[in-house]
């Protein structure tokens, strides 16, 4: 067992940075509600939901490294060992945290627990797949900005819980009108998510650089200005030297630009499939 209570194998990461690195069977039991619950609570009102909520709050404010069973016991006003009666350790807790924050790509994460628990079939989805793609992208970007720690973890082997599956179900239902094959629908989701993650990571890295160095973006680039101006005047970089002054302006919305191009590309594919379907009929 790791120092934080994780029970993953020696070959697996046990520092809480890799999903699925703990006791997978226990994570699944906790996610799907099939595991045993403490017969008597060590503290009135302590629940698994409260523990997960507190862990997310700490991670949002201070990063994933600040999340520990000891820290959560302080936040919740209970003994550290009491928490282990609900969740084995940080690795399994991360599985629960991830399921919570990534489970609703087409709705507001700040819903009540009752609203989150509604079956996917009872949840409204956009009628237009373009609206669905836009909503998926903007909601995911918002999630990544509220939870920057998401970009710090390895999600290659995510332990899927009901919230994550419900989110996927909603997305697939909203994209079904595209008329694509099932692997292609998953490809649309992966493409959109990858675009959003790339942009969010760039923005997050920039903010982190400012925090770590204390040097603002304007100061950073001003320090390079003399060298870059000489390089542009040298004639060695004609394309860059000819670019307009607003080329790298912060006013340009790269997210909106990229998302519009993705949707436009999907529209071409959808039109091709519709045409082929009409011809076949």
Image: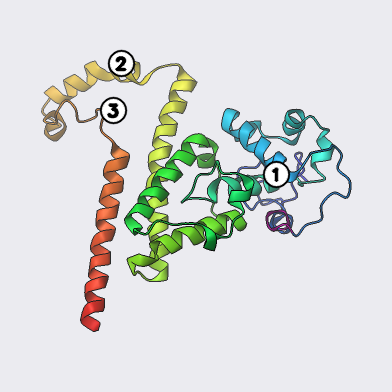
Left/right placement of residue 66 relative to residue 198 reads right
The numbered disc on residue 37 is none
Provide the major secondary structure of the magenta segment. helix
In depth, the one of 198 and 104 nearer the eye is: 104
Number of the front mark, 2 or 1: 1
Q: Is residue 48 above or below residue 275?
A: above
Front position in the image: 236 or 164: 164
Q: Which residues are magenta?
A: 29-33
| C-alpha distance separating marks 2 and 3 | 18 Å
Q: Which residue is tagged 1?
A: 49
* Residue at image location 45% in from the left, 16% down from the top: 214
Q: The residue tagged with tag 3: helix, strand or loop?
A: loop
Residue 254 seen: yes
Image location of residue 181, percent across then percent down: 38, 71
Q: Residue at x 33, y 65 (%)?
A: 178
Residue placed under numbered mark 3 in the picture: 250
Q: Earlier in the sequence, mark 1 or mark 3?
A: 1
Does the magenta-highlighted stretch encompass residue 278? no
Dots 1, 3 in contact, CB < 8 A: no
Taking the image as shown, residue 168 lies to the left or right of residue 253, namely right
Where, quadrant-wise, is the C terminus in this rendering?
bottom left
């Amino acid at each position: 067992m790791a120092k934080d209570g994780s029970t993953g194998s020696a070959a697996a990461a046990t520092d809480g940075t890799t999903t699925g690195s703990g006791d997978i069977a226990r994570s699944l039991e906790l996610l799907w509600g099939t595991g045993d619950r403490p017969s008597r609570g060590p503290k009135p009102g302590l629940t698994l939901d409260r523990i997960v909520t507190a862990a997310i709050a700490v991670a949002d404010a201070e990063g994933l490294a600040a999340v520990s069973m000891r820290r959560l016991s302080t936040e919740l006003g209970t003994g550290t060992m009491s928490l282990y009666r609900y969740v084995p350790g940080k690795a399994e807790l991360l599985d629960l945290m991830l399921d919570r924050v990534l489970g609703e790509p087409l709705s507001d994460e700040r819903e009540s627990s009752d609203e989150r628990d509604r079956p996917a079939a009872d949840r409204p989805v956009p009628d237009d797949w373009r609206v669905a793609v836009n909503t998926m992208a903007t909601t995911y970007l918002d999630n990544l900005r509220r939870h920057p720690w998401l970009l710090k973890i390895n999600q290659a082997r995510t332990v899927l819980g009901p919230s994550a599956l419900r989110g996927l179900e909603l997305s697939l239902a909203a994209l079904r009108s595209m008329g694509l094959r099932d692997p292609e629908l998953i490809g649309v989701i992966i493409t959109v998510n990858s675009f959003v993650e790339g942009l969010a990571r760039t923005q997050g890295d920039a903010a982190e650089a400012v925090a770590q160095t204390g040097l603002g973006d304007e100061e950073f680039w001003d320090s390079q200005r003399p060298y870059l101006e000489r390089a542009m005047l040298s004639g060695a970089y004609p394309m860059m030297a000819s670019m307009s002054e607003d080329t790298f302006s912060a006013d340009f919305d790269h997210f909106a630009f990229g998302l519009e191009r993705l949707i436009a590309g999907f529209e071409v594919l959808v039109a091709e499939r519709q045409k082929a379907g009409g011809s076949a009929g």
